[in-house]
Image (tube, rainbow, N blue to C red):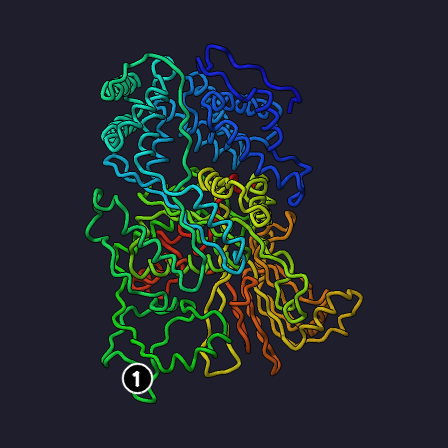
Amino acid sequence: MASGPPEQPAGSLRIPRCSPTVPEPELYRSIQAVLPRETDNQLSPDCLNKGMLRWTLHKKVQNNPANSLSLVWVLIKELEKAERWDSRRFIIPLIHTLMYAIIQTAYIPDELYKRVYDFCKRLLTYPHPYCTVGLSYTRQIKTERSIPGLMYQRMVTAEQRLKNEHYPFQDRVFILADPEVFSGSLGMVLLGDIETYGSVNPFDHMCSVVQHSIQAALGAEQCHGPKLAQALKDMGQDVESHFQEVLAALEQSAEEGNRGDGGVLRSRLQQLYSKILSETDSEPLSSGGLCDCPLPNPEMSFHLWTEELDIWRELAKWFRSSSITEQFPHIPEQEDFELGESPSDLMPSDMTRFSIMSDDSGIERDLPPNADPFTPSSLDTASMSSSWEQCKSEQDAARLFRRGGIKMKPSVKDSMVLMQDTLEEHPSLGGGGGGGGGGRGGSKGTLQRRAGNSVVQNPFPKQQRQFTARIVAMGDDRVLGRLAKAYYIFRKREARRLFLTMKVNLQFYYIPVCGPTTPNSSIKESLLQPKGDPCTLGSYLSMVDPWYNSNVKSLGCMIPKLAKMQHTNPGRPKEPFVSDVISYYVRTGQQPVYFTIYYVKITFTNMTKDPVEDVFLTHLEMEFPEFRQISASVREKHKWSAGEVCGAVVSLNYKKVTLSGRDVDKGISVRTSGTQISAIPSNEAEDLNCLTLTFNESQTKSKNNMADSKIRMSNVKIRTLESRSFTVTLDKDCRRTFKDVQSIEICPCLDPGYSVQKTMRSKFSLGEDKDAGLSKYMCKGLPLPINTFAGILT
């Protein structure tokens, strides 16, 4: 990139009567400071400060419309320069910053719109993910050019849930924080930051929408911003009628598309402008300065993710309490049912019978002594560890339980809707979607992780839904494990009875935050602490998306610093830094990276204890407790030979994956003290969408020869061949630890949408297990999409 500042834009395109308070050379230097460099390290201070610098840049231009226009000029010139010099690593950060500035700019000349549109259109010739981002922004700029102010109006209306009769869409941000991480000061900082913005009067938001829409259409030559702002403020609640009129004009123009005449919209808004000023006894002025209309942060709700929190229930409550449900009624067949169900009422995934009729009182205490009560699926129960179950067993025996009553079979219509949602989310173009559907395009045999929203790759375009729930998980790998399990239960619940699937669009985001370290912890506590990087998925996203590293991962590092600053100086004025960065992330981070959710079946040494079904996302640890301290010594002394290794003999039956796609079934018996099974690669060279099994010992001796210390596989079954049992920990979460385990089976988790379709098809085909019909277009696995700014940059 050039070292000097860019040339000044033409004077005829500047906003008259409003000179910038921030010089363009200073804006240029600020932009250069936030751009990621090839020499940046993920944890370097310069890289972690880029998120703060980006936030400061937007704050500089927020309170002056001329500053926003100057920033747009500088950014488009930097993008064109990056295109000429083939500096592609700058394109994603610059274009996201540009679009965020365009939304908030009061007025943009048509020549500048055309320049931005032409650049976005040229991105369509670039490889993925640049073409995907370019396609999305090309459509937005084309619409915004013909209908100025539409993006701002729709964003504020949806995010603030403003009552209207023309735009029925709503957005809501749900922040789910791990209480193990956000305990004490960290939780108070996050909650205080979100509450700093406070609840704003909806009529103030309506004033902002009317002000911005009129200014964006008329410009400073035909609109006097301060007069208009004062007139809207004096109206109070009467501004709602003008807000409805603005929405009607803009949405009607959007429906007409290119067939409409932009002059008609400007004429309607010009008449409304004169009407507003005349109603307040103000003389309509033809020209003047423009007023800023800052983009408010979306409505957010903060939740500490305790055992009692049910995501499905929170979404259902939000949907029920929506102010739009009365104005935009839904189809009667899709009406919701009672919220009295709990996740433990769900059916096991392998049940083929959908109806269970109870012929008794339905109370466990009334059953005969030798009767076996209905046992719900262990995957959906609230108990996470065997120790917790043992503590609760005596209390549960004294309670009254109702047996499972009639389980309704999903209707054909509901099943087709769930299948359609599966096809829209992640289709398998290669047929079958082997390996859990994690590969790009879902083609069988590929180990490349799928990322990005590409309409070209998806023949089943996603239908727009009225409600969008943006779920932001904050914490380490443990909170992601809970998110994966909650998502699976959500899909399973919808497979049983459709309610939210076709009404609410789920978008997932992740902010990695590590818990406080305790250097003086005891030896017992140190053994229980997770080994290695506690935020492996966050580190991976930072590796494949530099802009994610600069803005999101840096936020996780800043939160503990903000807590310390607030503790030392409690009287300091609060700036909503955290909520501002979250708002930027959820608005511009629209390119998902798909992570396969893995199913695990755990069998215990006690034969009277039923097997447990669960899922994990990032990591599974298998360890023999009696060799835990010895295992730590072995890892420290790499010179130990395989014959000196202590441990138990286990059998491994697994499917070894290869780059050629010729997977091989293998089986070995080894002596080991434990294994680590990871689903997230630690470096870019090993970025394969599969499981990686690593023995605790550097070299492990099998029955016939030396076994590889690292095995890549798609599924595995591990069983102890001795009388010893082992423990299993999922996603490094001690709350999800299972003891006295005899064997485990791991494979990619099947999507309940695919399972429903397969169950329906099996009734009409005898002995055929081959995918047919829509099955060959469906992804068998259930991936968890985490949104980033670019997806995966290669």
SS assignment at label 1: helix
Residue 264 shows in the view: no
For this orientation, the residue located farthest to the right is 639
- Residue 287, above or below 291: above
- Residue 503, above or below 110: below
Relative image position of residue 372 (x, y in whole percent) = 35, 83
Q: Quadrant of residue 323?
A: top left
Kindly identify the amino acid type of the residue bearing the numbered disc 1: Arg
Residue at image x 47%, y 37%?
588
Q: Could you tell me which quadrant the N terminus lies in?
A: top right
Residue at image x 43%, y 28%?
104
Q: Residues within 10 Å of mark 1 (few under 14, many from 20)?
A: some
Of 237 and 439, nearer the camera is: 237
For this orientation, the residue located farthest to the left is 332
Q: Could you tell me which quadrant the C terminus lies in?
A: top right
Relative image position of residue 270 (x, y in whole percent) = 28, 17
Q: How many marks?
A: 1
For this orientation, the residue located farthest to the front is 571
Relative image position of residue 178 (x, y in whole percent) = 50, 57
Pointer 1 residue:
365
Residue 471 shows in the view: yes
For this orientation, the residue located farthest to the bottom is 369
* Residue 351 appears left or right of 282: right
Relative image position of residue 354 (x, y in whole percent) = 29, 68
